[in-house]
Amino acid sequence: YTKQDVSVVNPANTIIVGTKNTVVGNNIVKIGNCTFEKSGIESLVMPNSITSIGGMLFNACCDLKSVTLSNGIDTIPMSTFNGCTSLVEVVIPEGVKKIERSAFYYCSALTELVIPDSVEIIEDHVFSGCSSLESVIFGAGVKSIGDAPFLRCEAVREITLRAVTPPTLLVDLFRDSEHVVSDVTIYVPMESVEKYKTSESWSKYADLIVGY
C-alpha cells in the first residue's frame, strides 16, 4: 500500500497509517506517530474521542492548511506540525497542558496563534522557522516557556502574555542575531507590568513590555 490510498486502524482503535482522505470517526481514541506524514492531507477536524496523538503526526504535510485538535488531548507532541508549510489555522482547545519541542517547526505560512489558558508548559523552539508568524497570544496559565520559541521568526511583532505571574523563560525569546527585537511589542496584564520588567526572565525585554 501507499499512504495515498490506504488507512490502517489497529484493534485498539488507533490510526497508524493515515491518508489524504482519511475520515477520523468517533470510535478513534488515538492517532499514532507520523500517521499522516507526507500524506497530502489538506485539513482535519479531530473528534473529541481522541485522547492522544503521536509525535511528528503531520510531518512534511505540505498541503495541510487547517487543523482543529481534539479537546480530549493534553499534549501537542514534539514536531507535530513539522514542515507544514501551508498551515494557516490551528485550533488548540482548552485542556491542552503542554506543547512539546518544535511542535510548529517551520510552519512558514502561519501568521497567528492563540494558546489557551490551560497550557502550562511550552518547550524549546516551538515556533522556530515560522517566518510569517506575526502574533502569538499565550494563555493565562502558562508557567514555563522554553528556549528560543521565536528563532527565525522574522515577522513577529506582537507577543501577548495573559499570565499575571511572569512565566519562566529559558534563556531567550529569539536567539537570532538578525532579529530586530525593537520591532516587537510584548503585551502583559496592566497590573503585572513591573513584575515582568523586573523578573529575571523578562527584564532584558523591559523596553518592549507594555500593559493592556
Image (tube, rainbow, N blue to C red):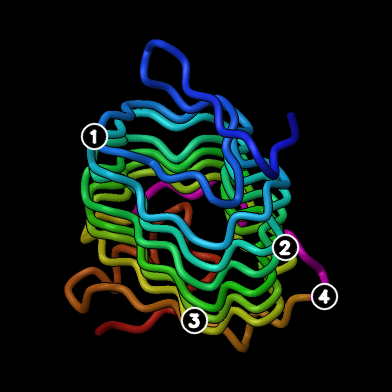
| Disc 3 to disc 4: CB gap under 8 Å | no
Identity of the amino acid at label 1?
A: Ser
What residue lies at 82% left-to-right and 69% top-to-bottom? 177
Residues at marks 2 and 4, CA–CA distance in whole angstroms: 13 Å
Residue 203 position, x and y percent, is 48, 64
Q: Which residues are magenta?
A: 167-178
Q: What kind of element bears circle 4?
A: loop
Give the quadrant of residue 110.
bottom right
Rendered position, 137 above or below 72: below
Rendered position, 204 above or below 94: below
Going from N to C along the chain, the mark reached first, 3 or 1, is 1
Which of the numbered marks, if any, corresponds to residue 208? Answer: 3
What residue lies at 42% left-to-right and 45% top-to-bottom? 23
Closer to the observer: label 3 or label 1?
Answer: 1
CA neighbours of label 3 inside 10 A, class few (<14), some (14 to 19), many (20+)? some
Residues at marks 3 and 1, CA–CA distance in whole angstroms: 42 Å
Identity of the amino acid at label 2?
A: Gly
Q: What kind of element bears circle 2?
A: loop
Q: Which residue is mark 4?
A: 178
Residue 77 position, x and y percent, is 51, 35
Residue 94 position, x and y percent, is 22, 51
Residue with the most extreme right position = 178
Quadrant the N terminus occupies: top right
Closer to the observer: label 2 or label 4?
Answer: 2
Q: Which residue is mark 1?
A: 49
Please identify the dominant SS of the magenta region.
loop
Residue 107 position, x and y percent, is 65, 63
Going from N to C along the chain, the mark reached first, 2 or 1, is 1
Going from N to C along the chain, the mark reached first, 3 or 4, is 4
